[in-house]
Amino acid sequence: MVDAKNIIVAKQEVNLQVSNEIEFKTAITEVDDKLFWIGLPRIDGQVLMLQEKQKVKVSVSTRYGFYSAETSLEQIGKDSMKFYGLAIPENFDKKQKRQYVRAKYATNVKFSSANLTAQTTLVDFSAGGMMVYMVPKLARMLQIGGDIYSSFQINNVSFNVKVRLAWIKDYDNIFYAGFEFLYLLPGIRKELEALATAYSATST
């Protein structure tokens, strides 16, 4: 178990699960003695209305692992950026340990497959894969299929890596795609791991 004060901090991204059907990603806007606040959430463009005392599962992904706890909606505010006040759980349970350290880093990523190319922006990366913003050209490339390669730079170090789609997710009507790195040489993986560790200090 982990003390919540080490996880619940302003600007921290959290995943909130209201039911088996409703789950969304948001960011903590403010923290006080007993509550952490989020803005008014929207799912598929629709405002999500919650009730006071409604139970919510909160999950937080850090560079060290994935933590989860149950909380409840304690207060509804009037500010759109401080709309729902949820109780700060006493402790979080660690659900899984990351195989690789993950770090946020923004840079251009070029995908290529046969005669198709697509450019997007990196959200985060590890020695095992990366998350990018989904764009129409990339979606079309994935629909056609075939081998896909990604090219990007981190701290002026260039990488050209074969990738495989792992997932596509919708957070607040913004689509993201997760890719797994394939057939990395040990030296390349070690270099990516070192870069992720270096940048992870500012990722949480």
Image (cartoon, grey):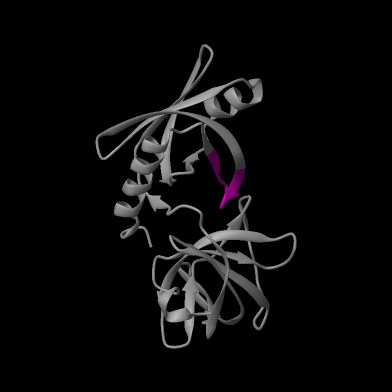
**Residue 152 within the segment the image draws in magenta:** no
Q: Quadrant of residue 23?
A: bottom right
Q: Is residue 76 visible?
A: no
Q: Main secondary structure of the magenta part?
A: strand
Q: Quadrant of residue 121?
A: top left
Q: Is residue 74 visible?
A: yes
Q: Position of residue 197 (x, y in %)?
A: 34, 54
- Side (left or right) of 163 relative to 9: right
Q: Position of residue 196 (x, y in %)?
A: 36, 49
| Quadrant where the image shows the C terminus | bottom left
In-front residue for pair 141/34 = 141
Q: Quadrant of residue 29?
A: bottom left
- Side (left or right) of 10 relative to 58: left
Q: Residue at the location (43% across, 65% down)?
A: 12
- Residue 123, compared with residue 83, is above or below; it is above
Q: Position of residue 92 (x, y in %)?
A: 54, 77
Q: Residue at the location (64% across, 81% down)?
A: 52
In-front residue for pair 89/196 = 196
- Residue 173, compared with residue 49, is above or below; it is above
User: Which residue reaches farthest top?
Assistant: 115
Q: Position of residue 74 (x, y in %)?
A: 58, 84
In the rendered structure, which segment of residues is drawn in magenta?
Answer: 168-179
